[in-house]
């Protein structure tokens, strides 16, 4: 992954100093890239989406409410950017495919690379709305309330998407 902070003039769109934005970028870039990778299923597209996420965050920094969770805010931007990529591709008739990333490199400790690959394939098969909620909740660890606010959906809808995703993945992994 090679994502870099956006290059714009200070004060153009952001209330953050360049140093503050750079610090937030360094802190959140891996998580943003992970969200984009899981939603898009391709390393190159995920890098592009992560880059666009930080450009939008920089442009909209004045919309971030002080005291709010910056991680949840940037994750909602990443989700929106990735879903917009998927929508654009579907309009062009393209379909998302797994990138073929080395599953051993991506595997969590104690999880076999084969199981990890099956899980990533299953996640890629989820409908976009369900996938985004599942990734934010079960993989990134956001609460239903945080996801609800970030995606402007009801908390019960978040729980329904998580339930549907888990049920689908149980069946997918049992094959």
Image (cartoon, rainbow, N blue to C red):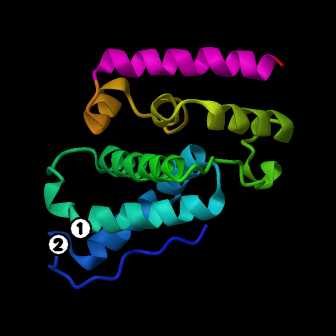
Residue 95: numbered disc: none
Q: In this view, does 14 lie to the left or right of 77?
A: left
Q: Which residue is painted at 58% across and 49% down in the image? A: 93
CA separation in Å, label 1 and label 2? 5 Å
- Please state which of residues 126 and 60 is positioned toward the viewer in this rendering: 126
In which quadrant will I find the C terminus?
A: top right
Q: Which residue is painted at 49% across and 21% down in the image? A: 162
Q: Which residue is painted at 57% across and 22% down in the image? A: 165
Q: Is residue 88 visible?
A: yes
- Residue 3 in the magenta stretch? The answer is no
Secondary structure state at the residue bearing disc 1: helix
- Give yes or no for contact between labels 1 and 2 (Cβ–Cβ under 8 Å): yes
In terms of sequence position, does the residue under pointer 1 or pointer 2 come before the other? 2
Q: Position of residue 19 (x, y in %)?
A: 29, 77
Residue indicated by mark 2 = 13
Secondary structure state at the residue bearing disc 2: loop
Q: Where is residue 11 in the image (x, y as percent from the top left)?
A: 14, 79
Q: In this view, does 142 lie to the left or right of 118?
A: left
Our reading of the magenta stretch's main secondary structure is helix
Residue 24 higher or lower than 172, as above or below: below
In which quadrant will I find the N terminus?
A: bottom right
Residue indicated by mark 1 = 59
Mark 1, other Cα within 10 Å: few <14 / some 14–19 / many ≥20: some
- Residue 161 in the magenta stretch? The answer is yes
Q: Position of residue 70 (x, y in %)?
A: 29, 50
Range covered by the magenta-colored residues: 154-174
Q: In this view, does 147 lie to the left or right of 91?
A: left
């Amino acid at each position: 992954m090679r994502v870099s902070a956006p290059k714009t003039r200070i004060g153009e769109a952001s209330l953050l100093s360049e140093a503050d934005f750079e610090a937030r970028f360094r802190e959140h870039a891996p998580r943003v890239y992970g969200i984009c990778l899981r939603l898009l299923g391709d390393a190159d597209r995920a890098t592009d989406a992560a880059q666009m996420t930080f450009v939008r965050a920089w442009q909209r920094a004045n919309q971030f409410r002080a005291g709010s969770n910056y991680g949840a805010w940037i994750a909602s931007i990443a989700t929106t950017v990735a879903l917009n990529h998927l929508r654009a591709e579907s309009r062009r008739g393209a379909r998302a495919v797994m990138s073929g990333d080395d599953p051993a490199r991506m595997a969590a400790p104690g999880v076999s690379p084969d199981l990890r690959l099956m899980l990533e394939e299953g996640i890629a098969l989820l409908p976009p709305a369900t996938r985004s909620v599942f990734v934010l909740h079960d993989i990134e660890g956001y609460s239903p309330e945080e996801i609800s606010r970030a995606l402007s959906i009801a908390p019960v809808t978040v729980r329904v998407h998580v339930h549907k995703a888990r049920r689908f993945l149980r069946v997918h992994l049992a094959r």
